Amino acid sequence: MNRTALTRSSLSPADMARHWAALVILASLHVASPIDAGAQQLVPGTESPIERLKARVRAESPSLGARRASLEVAIARRQVAGTVGPASLNAEAEEVPSGVNLFSAGSLKLNMSREFVPRPRLAAERALANQEIERARLEVELTTQAIGASVDQLVARASGAAAIATRLASEDSLLVGTEEAVRSRFSVGDARYVGVLRLRTERLHVATELQRTRSDARVARLQILRLAEPTTRVVGESSAEVVALTDAAIAAEAAQILDGALPMAPSVDSLLARSGAVRLAALDVQRAEAARRLVLADQRPSLQGAVGMQRFTNNAGGYSLGPTLGVSVTLPFTARRGNEARQVVAEREIVLANATQRTIEYRVTTSLAAALDRYETARSRLTTFDVALLRGAREEREAALASFRTGSLTLLELLDFERALAEAEISRIRSRVDAADALVDLYLIALGSEGQDALSKPTGAPHLEND
């Protein structure tokens, strides 16, 4: 049996809710931005549309590409850290006749020297390089997660705005039918002109809200397309594949917005333990400690050995050839004041890193608590909606319109019923979108996205609240 041919009597309440959700989002996508039917055909895959959309956005993200490049640079630098420098070759000539006859010089020396770097210094250099790798790897991880959260947020906003637009269009459609009936009555003197004006006023209000909500849905959708295809400079020139994937993700999210249950929010402590900002601050402390160990290692005595050959004149007037050996050692105590100053700087940097870590922990904890309160408030507001009552009122909608046409229901009663039902359904959608938005904000704060370009939320996101 064709899905569109199902009647209300053949559907259970749960099936009706899902069927209504599917109709809502399909109509919303056409209202927000019509696309070719061929562009909506997706190749079946193992992943959901929104996961494939996230993968596409991550693959096209310049910020994530820069983070990955930074990681490759840090890994390359690790190969250099803790290695010994090249040996040096020295040549000396003494007692050179006429200043240019080197072959007749009284003494010729050829030495090869090399520094023997202490192992603690090599280990300190490697430890510092490892800290840079860990930081770069963590930044890649956080950027990847933040991009996925931002996509979730935009998809929820786009699908919510599209669903609201469809509900407003349904209300406008009912008002159009009602206006036709009122005009028919007015033409035969069975209705007053004030009824016609009342309907026009209501339609103007609905049309204004409808256009604003369609614009919100279009803005959110275009932002997703920009993320998935950042090289596109002209609106409407996105590839068919990206358009189809975006619309499929929005359609899939609509069912969750209209019929899905909200997950329980994680605790502040668990989010704080996984917080990107806190983890980065902890790495900064470890890096400062590694830098201090390197400063201390640089202040230890180091040896430099040399070996070579020397040709010199002998008592018989000829030349003799013999080996040369040399050893040099640095004397750190001769630069005691400079060494102590460098140690003080390294220790102060550790103190600064620890203080910064505590500050970040406090700021993130405060922000997480506020975001968690916002999410729990949105969840509690959503639970106040009586789904069964809304479903029953929706089923009575056609009956109310039929009663008005037969004269058993007044125009004012019909308009009050439709306005109350539309406001309740739209408020429920907005509450669901607000909850999803708050949950994404919670995870973005935990990731440490505040103030960072790579992890920041997309700007210009639509607002679904009433003006």
Image: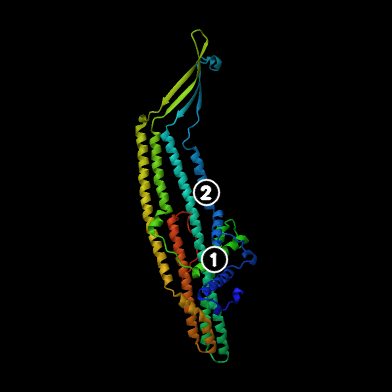
What is the number of callouts on the image?
Answer: 2
Q: Which amino acid does label 2 sit on?
A: Arg
Q: What residue type is labelled 1?
A: Ala
Which residue is labeled 1 in the image? 252
Quadrant of the snapshot with the N terminus: bottom right
Q: Report how far apart the C-alphas of labels 2 and 1 lie in the structure.
A: 31 Å
- The picture places residue 275, in percent across and down from the top left corner, at 42, 54
- Answer with left or right where residue 64 lies relative to residue 355: right
- Answer with left or right where residue 53 lies relative to residue 279: right
| Residue at image point 37% right, 43% down | 349
Q: Nearer the viewer, residue 267 or 315?
A: 267
Res 340 → quadrant: top left
Q: Which of 42 and 407 is in front in this view?
A: 42
Res 332 → quadrant: top left
Mark 1 surroundings: few (<14), some (14-19) or many (≥20) residues within 10 A = many
> In the rendering, which numbered label is found on residue 68?
2
Relative to 203, does residue 280 appear above or below in the rendering? above
Relative to 371, does residue 175 appear above or below in the rendering? below
- Answer with left or right where residue 432 lies relative to residue 249: left
Relative to 313, does residue 45 appear above or below in the rendering? below
Label 1 SS? helix
- Answer with left or right where residue 16 lies relative to residue 294: right
- The picture places residue 445, in percent across and down from the top left corner, at 43, 57
> In the rendering, which numbered label is found on residue 466?
none
- The picture places residue 319, in percent across and down from the top left corner, at 52, 12
| Residue projecting furthest to the top | 316
